[in-house]
Image (tube, rainbow, N blue to C red):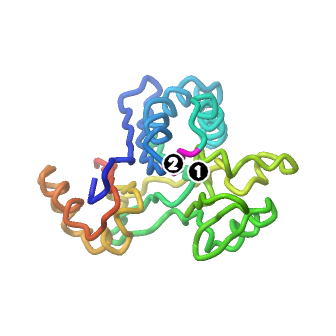
Amino acid sequence: QGRRREMEDGCAIATGLPSGVSLVGVFDGHGGDDAARYCSSNLFKLLVRDERFEKGEFRESLHSVFLSTDEGFAGHGSTSSGTTAVVALVKEGRFFVAHAGDSYCSLVKNKQMIHLTKDHVPSNLDEADRARKSKCVVHDGVVSKDGSLSTLAVTRAIGDFEFKDNPKKSREEQAVVADPEILEQEICDGCEFLILASDGLERKYVESCREEISKALKEKNFEALKEIVARAQSNDNKTMVIVEFLK
């Protein structure tokens, strides 16, 4: 939880599914924990029921379900709550990662950490351009709206509907969108594990702890993993989920 008054992060894990798929997700909420809790409880349920998921069309299914989760949360009654989302889907020698916002996924391969995702934030020129075209203001690393005190430090999220209400723009042209970026990769011999984390755990810090994390995994020392998260110098909520590729 860090020094925050409330814990707004959420996570979800689903293993042993009939399809042979394993799912993990991290959700970094803001404006309250409503959106993160909704995603933690509902995104995977929607995914496994999706027709494309059953057909093994995982890329298409992930994209569709991020959007349907956003639509479902719209009927939940909260307009100011939102959450980032990063989800990993693992099956039979390959994995997919879908993400929206600044929660991230990194791969440890051959004792090196590879950052697989890029943040959807206003400093990204393409993201900022879309926000400006939707009549929002981008300044000092945040998106804001004229006449509103609300600001947002990400440009893709589930929820945050006050930044998705320009009647002259389509869903994918709004200042903030729920569309995820999705990657697919084979699990090769050198692949050790994935790390999914909220931005309360900075990438540089996690990378500096790579050897400690590897050692703790080998020893199944889960208290050591919790200690790594706890000692991170951050006032923000902190969540980390690790997916180990067993040989």
Could one spot residue 57 in this view of the protein? no
Residue at (58% x, 31% y) in the render: 77
User: Which percent across, then down, holds residue 95?
Assistant: 48, 48
User: Which percent across, then down, holds residue 96?
Assistant: 52, 48
Which of the 4 image quadrants contains residue 240? bottom left
User: Which percent across, then down, holds residue 170?
Assistant: 82, 47
Q: Residue furthest right?
A: 168
Element at label 2: strand
Element at label 1: loop
Residue at (37% x, 55% y) in the render: 194
144 displayed left or right of 38: right
Residues packed near mark 2 inside 10 Å, few (<14), some (14 to 19) or many (20 plus):
many
Q: Which mark is residue 157?
A: 1
231 displayed left or right of 88: left
Residue 40 falls within the magenta-colored stretch: no
Pointer 2: what residue?
Answer: 83
Q: How many marks?
A: 2
**Relative vertical location of residue 112 with respect to residue 15 in this rendering, above or below:** below
Q: Which mark is residue 223?
A: none
User: Which percent across, then down, holds residue 186?
Assistant: 49, 53
Q: Write down the region rendered in magenta.
A: 80-86
Q: Are marks 2 and 1 in contact (CB under 8 Å)?
A: yes
